[in-house]
Amino acid sequence: MLLDFDKLGGVRTLLIALVALVCLFLILPIVFIAALSFGSSQWLIFPPPSWTFKWYQDLFADPRWLYSALTSLKIAAIVTVLSVVIGFLAALGLDRGRFAGRDLLRALFLTPMILPVVVLAVALYALFLKLGLAGTTIAFVIAHLLIALPFSIISIGNALEGFDRSIEDAAILCGANPWEARLRVTVPAISHGIFGAAVFSFLASWDEVVLAIFMASPTLQTLPVKIWTTLRQDLTPVIAAASTLLIAFTILLMIVAALFRKGRKA
Amino acid sequence: MTQPFLSINGIRKNYGNVTAVKNVSMDIAQGEFMTFLGPSGSGKSTTLYILAGFQDPSGGDILLNGQSLLSTPSHKRNIGMVFQRYTLFPHLTVGENVAFPLRIRRRPQAEIAERVKAALKLVRLEGFEDRMPALMSGGQQQRVALARALVYNPPVLLMDEPLSALDKKLREEIQFEIRRIHQETGVTILYVTHDQEEALRLSDRIAVFSQGEIDQIGTGPELYSNPATRFVAGFIGDSNFLDATVVTSNAGKAKLALGDGAVVEGVPLHGPSAASSRASLMLRPERLSLSRVSVPSGIAVTVRDITFLGNNVEVSTATPAGVDLAVRLPFGHEAISSLARGEQAWLTFDTASAHAFA
Amino acid sequence: MAVTVVTGAVKTKRGATLGYLLPALLLIALFFIVPVLMLLMRSVLEPEVGLQNYKALLGSTTYLRVFLNTFLVAGVVTLVSIVVGYPVAWLLAIMPQKWSRIVLAIIILSMWTNLLARTYAWMVLLQRTGVINKTLMGLGLIDTPLALVNNLVGVTIGMTYIMLPFVILPLMGVIRTIDPAILRAAALCGAGKMQCFLRVLLPLSLPGIAAGALMVFVMSLGYFVTPALLGGTSNMMLAELVAQFVQSLVNWGMGGAAALVLLVVTLALYAVQLRYFNPARGT
């Protein structure tokens, strides 16, 4: 009865109240930031004395914000493509391969995701200093790729697991060579996994803070680095404006993902 | 001697030190419907995969019109195949699925449209071109798969237990369709199944697989009336087995002593025929007669149970030694009117219809 | 008769498979294994060969304080996340879909929102003149503003906020796999609500709880951003220490040593997770 929603009795009221509170806890900071970004108080007083677009004007007036956003976008785009391609190949190898140590290899591929990012950041920083790559786009891409790749391997790997391999075999007997069969049949059939890999890879790169802080140079910064350095100086409402735009972007991405899922079902 | 259409010569397949296929050879005529029948793990599917090129044999060769197929990769073998599960491309419509092999072969658009239409007509799915596979029933999906496998006119069509995912009624319906399509197209079909009824219903000839080898190849009636091994006898049709001892044997006919002292003569004997060696006597339930009065050469049994099966009645009996023997009699047969459990009865049979396996 | 299911019909050439794995393998080897090993090497090579960095790290009360902070925060965050997250996951698993969709959307929105944006929100909310202090004072509950930021309280609140979704979502999955009929059977056997919960529901969801707790604990141990922004300079956590050695003090030896400590603890817990709660083997 504890797993029957209609038969929970008094426990249900208690649980519903708790869930409502947790929802408030999760959503309020986000709503709050969005509200403050339109508030006129420099000191982020709530409720704001009046409403304004000033902070958005400040944000767009400073070309460093736009430039760092473009840098983030460029790096995230490159990382997404590489992560999906390399992740697809790796997931395929793990799914199709019959060799000893396969589980171990899968665990190794996923390690960068669970390892403290700061260790990876410091280690890569040292390596790139030695290689003379510190502060370059390549350094950013490699670093971000390392943490994006596990998402791709998991997402595409799950999709491959749910894909009946006989379908690919059927395509081969229909006359398609193995790669033709994969690209024309397997890839479309697991498109949801590939889409998921792309979204997560993009987000992993776009939102990455710790690696980016160590990869950045005064002339090459991603958006999170720009927010970070600004935050360390003061709590200006310009960051609220930037955060609100990021939240809007997240909601947009969620809607796209939801539509994609709906489109697949229809 | 004319060259066979499709020839499987001594195919072997080992996985490490496990032998999946030992030594499979057969010739298949053009237009023949050949079924590989056997339990799971008997090597029938592996042989089919070797034909499809999904697996390489450890030894042996496969010749199509005298040409070896082994060096040709799967996608160039031009073979059609229908799989166990529904293997339609989920992102393509029915029409696009059937058109796929032709698109790969870069046929002109007009020809593709025409042939897709004809293939769908063949499987009685005209007008389904724009459907998505996920919205079709299992039976319909398998018919689309059949159309896709036939649209490029492959010389050989492989079918790997294509009906195993369907329920019984649908299965019979599609078996009928497969027979019709086989007759209409004249395509050579190699069909894998573990269902003897399906094999008997569909095939021109059946190859019975057991433990990686072919026990016997023949038409259904041949396998039924003259099984080469005890395995074939047990797999095709229902059968009873009685332990016996060979008394004498001559020209493939044996005189056998049964456990309870009864002696039968003139039973076809398969296998080595030394006197006093052990043998298994196979009796078909429908070839046994039941008598309620003592018969000199009859096997004395006790009636255990009587089961009504529609047009037949099955009488389960047991010998004094405890061996179960089933007898099948037409419903309404005088021998079983008011027959009761526990009654004594005597079983007789025509020795020519029995078989002994040494 | 049983249906024979044949898997892996197609031959897979071993070489081809390894070829697919090669790009990922190269990336991981060259830019993950090699640099991490190089960093760890520096901890015993710089400034001179020996274990002096580890002696300094483990022998000083300052650094011991950092370890203590780290485990304390990670422990509290884990505990609170599980205690709060479990009931939420429970209700989420059984509530009507139209409601659970909304709750899930909120959870995913908070999870996907930029980490810095979320942390910034808490910095603003928790400051002395922030909404929370203002509200509490308005309600007459406190007279002077509470110090909620630049200390471990702030770090714990901010990190719990981040970790909650990571507990709720997997736990919901685990509870969904429990057959409600088992609980009905328990009730018919005469068990009261409390007994049903303690003797049936909780034990059945324990593997999920353990896996979730372990994951949150491991993630919290190595967290950098939230402690750096919400914690004060006097309440450092281990990840910050690693960064500080390298960035401000340019002491690669000590940085490497601190990184090794963090790495060893993390990998040990990861190994426990793989061994006992491997999702691939089913929990």
Image (cartoon, rainbow, N blue to C red):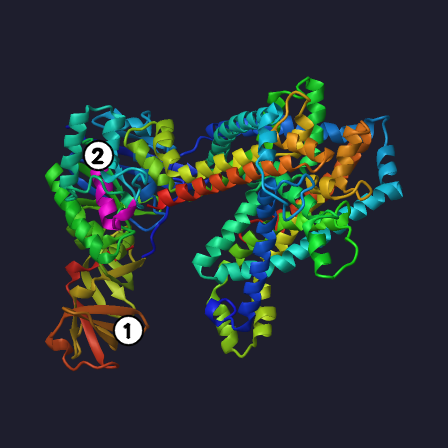
* Residue at (59, 26) in percent of width and height: A61
Q: Which residues are magenta?
A: B134-150
Placement of the C terminus of chain B among the 4 image quadrants: bottom left
Location of mark 2 (residue): B156
* Front disc: 1 or 2: 2
* Residue at (24, 23) in percent of width and height: B106
Front-most of residues C100 and A166: C100
Front-most of residues B327 and C145: C145
Say what secondary structure mark 1 lies in: strand
* Residue at (49, 36) in percent of width and height: A199
Q: Amino acid at mark 1?
A: Ala
Q: Residue furthest top?
A: A132
Front-most of residues B315 and A219: A219
Location of mark 1 (residue): B318
Within the magenta stretch, is there residue B142? Answer: yes
Discs 1 and 2 carry the same chain letter: yes
Horizontal and vertical percent for residue C135?
A: 69, 56
Horizontal and vertical percent for residue B186?
A: 13, 37
Residue at mark 2: chain = B
Q: Is residue B251 visible?
A: no
Q: Amino acid at mark 2?
A: Val
Say what secondary structure mark 2 lies in: strand
Placement of the N terminus of chain B among the 4 image quadrants: top left
- Residue A148 vs residue B348: left or right? right
Examine the image and state in which quarter residue B356 appears.
bottom left
